Amino acid sequence: MGKKYYKNKKSKKIKIEENKEENLIEIALITDNNYIVPTIITIQSIKNNINNSKKYNIFVLCDNVDIENKNLILRLVNSNLKINIVDVDKKFFSEFEKDTKDIYMVANTSALIKFLLPKLFNKLNKILYLDGDIIVNCDLSEIYDIDLKDNFVAAVRDLPQVLLEPQLIGAEISGVDYFNSGVMLLNLKEMRKENTYAELIRVKKELTNDNLMDQNVFNVVFKGKVHQLDLSYNVCYCNYKSTKRLDYTKLKKYYKEDYSTLEKIEKKAKIIHYSSFFKPWVYYDTPLAEIWTKMYYLSPLKEYPLNRVSVDGETNKSYKKTQEKLRLKNIEDANLTKKIIPIVLCPDHNYAKFASVTIQSIIENIKSKNCEYRIYIFHDEEFFLRDKILLKNMSTENVKVECLDVRNLINKEDLYSRAHYSKQMFYRWLIPEVLPQYTKVIYIDCDMVLNEDIKKLYDITIGEGNVIGAVKNRVQDEKMQNYLSCVVKIEPTEYVNSGVLVIYTHKFLNENIKEKCMEVLKTNDVFLCPDQDVINIVLKGKIKFIDESWNFQWANLKFTNYDKYNHKHNIIHYTSGVKPWKMNGVGDSLAECFWKYARKTPFYEEIIYSSINFQINKSINQKSINHKKNKHKFFLTRWITWPFRTFKAYQKDKREKNKEYAKAQNKIRVKYAVNRILHRVDIDNNPIPKKNKNKKR
């Protein structure tokens, strides 16, 4: 984060007092202005895992850090955690700036401050050094209390480097004991005794082509005096995942633990180190970024902008260029005086054209001049570049449309869909980890149009105990009521439609809602509306019911008691298989609302074509003339075989769902058959008016 990024009107000089308490866990971190964000998140993760019986003393060694950023760090102080800001003069490393100017370095010369630790803390016997791109998942006393004896350091082998054949680093420093310098318990007493500072400087001057800044130097100087820690104390997960040469069978030999898969390594990770180029504060879909994002929500940084891009997104250029672009964007957002209304849509390629209609309806109904409306399109590799360009070009002065690639955040093989649903429907679960800068985000389906300013929906209070706001899904169909009661285990009157959601992002992420949803989905494959049913199950009792006008489903038009409903439609949701862009719904009531906005979109011709194409396909798939001639014979056969088919359906329902559901469903089938024989209902189970009952067919 750049200079003067954070503004604090109460900024004051930092007073550093010498600590006189004993038995503290002493920790050191190094930062400059550009590394403030990850450093604060690292300290937040330490704070979250402190054992209440322990006391921590953290020294933040600053390389020319602004007073505003120092104050931001100090906001993390509590009764168990002291923070000392230490300004370090780095002039003695200026010669290394020249030496590294012409080669790429994974760190800047601030990392060489580690060499100074024995001198800076000449009264301490040991200190735990941590890089700033780390998340701590344990109480660090279990590392700090290790007896170092006469070793210089306790550290973790640098995987996959030490297991590669041949190894990538020179013979003088390679080997299975080569360690990563991002997590080091340093024996300061022994280092002073052996004057390692002079030796570290000497070796650094010799390794002129070394692009690791400090790590190789430490390995040369500390060789033979290293206490190896378990892999779990420095898991460089991104590095493991990106290499295809890592032999997991060797890990048990060194660690006496079963680290045979990436999943097992992740599960046992006590310290996660984002040591690759893919930093979670730059890329929202870097491996394990969601863990970092959870800490972001808990830290003081949640008050500030955090724009990020996708690793595979079109904005992904070089790391430095991307970082600079995002830094400027964060500054711009920090200075923005308008209120931001974030909205998310998740179309696949086939629904991109209909998403444009939704966006057009949002734009045309904006009434507030003091807001900036940000529409994010979550998509994957199936989305066309042309789709992205046309949608982004719909941006206006106060409406910004942005496309975010989320393919790396969820494994589509773990998802399932049915009927007309696409797997992209599950992308709404990813909103909190992709957009952590917003406390609240609106999600809307792409088969909708708005007739009101969406800001009014955003301003609705969800309530402290709730995670989302949603509209109840009116259920009058007896089969659906039975399904909800027996399978989903939700009262039909409490069941919500997931097409419009107001999401409290912080609660959603911190309560692990996505993980809970995925677990329910993996253990059940019988859901009729997969993502909607799962949301209702997981968030039962944590949903604020919003007025029906914010998600009016036009499928409700077929209900016989429709006149009793509120006819105000802030959002019209074109639910069911009948759509205004299909010939089966083009003439239905409220379809004109869709076409009013569709005519003004860049996809208008495609929408017209899809309507014509639907009708052509429907004609092709119609029953043959011969079948129509024999329809009486066909219906007779259907009635004769009805008992056998009903019994077969009962057995299937019992096997796939449960006995309770199967019995109730059978009663519904029998009731339907009787009503059909008596001409009480039509083929779609809609009541036949009394005046038509005696009419000849």
Image: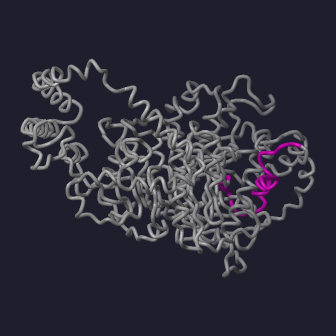
Q: Which residues are magenta?
A: 103-131
- Residue 153 falls inside the magenta stretch: no
Q: Which quadrant would residue 496 be assigned to in this image?
A: bottom left
Q: Residue furthest top?
A: 626
Classify 353 as above or below 125.
above
In the rendering, at what x and y percent does residue 446 appear? 47, 50
Exactly how many numbered labels are in the figure?
Answer: 0
Q: Which quadrant would residue 216 be assigned to in this image?
A: top right
Q: Is residue 122 left or right of residue 345?
A: right
Classify 189 as above or below 483.
below
Determine if residue 288 is in view. Answer: no
- Residue 129 falls inside the magenta stretch: yes
Q: Is residue 77 left or right of residue 511?
A: right
In the rendering, at what x and y percent does residue 546 appear? 35, 65
Foreground pick, 520 / 570: 570
Determine if residue 19 is in view. Answer: yes
Foreground pick, 153 / 439: 439
Foreground pick, 56 / 610: 610
In the rendering, at what x and y percent does residue 24 appear? 58, 63
Residue at 33% x, 43% y is: 529
Q: Is residue 657 left or right of residue 116?
A: left
Foreground pick, 324 / 137: 324
In the rendering, at what x and y percent does residue 462 appear? 39, 67
Quarter of the N terminus within the rendering: bottom right
Residue at 49% x, 64% y is: 440
Classify 414 as above or below 568.
above
Quarter of the C terminus within the rendering: top left
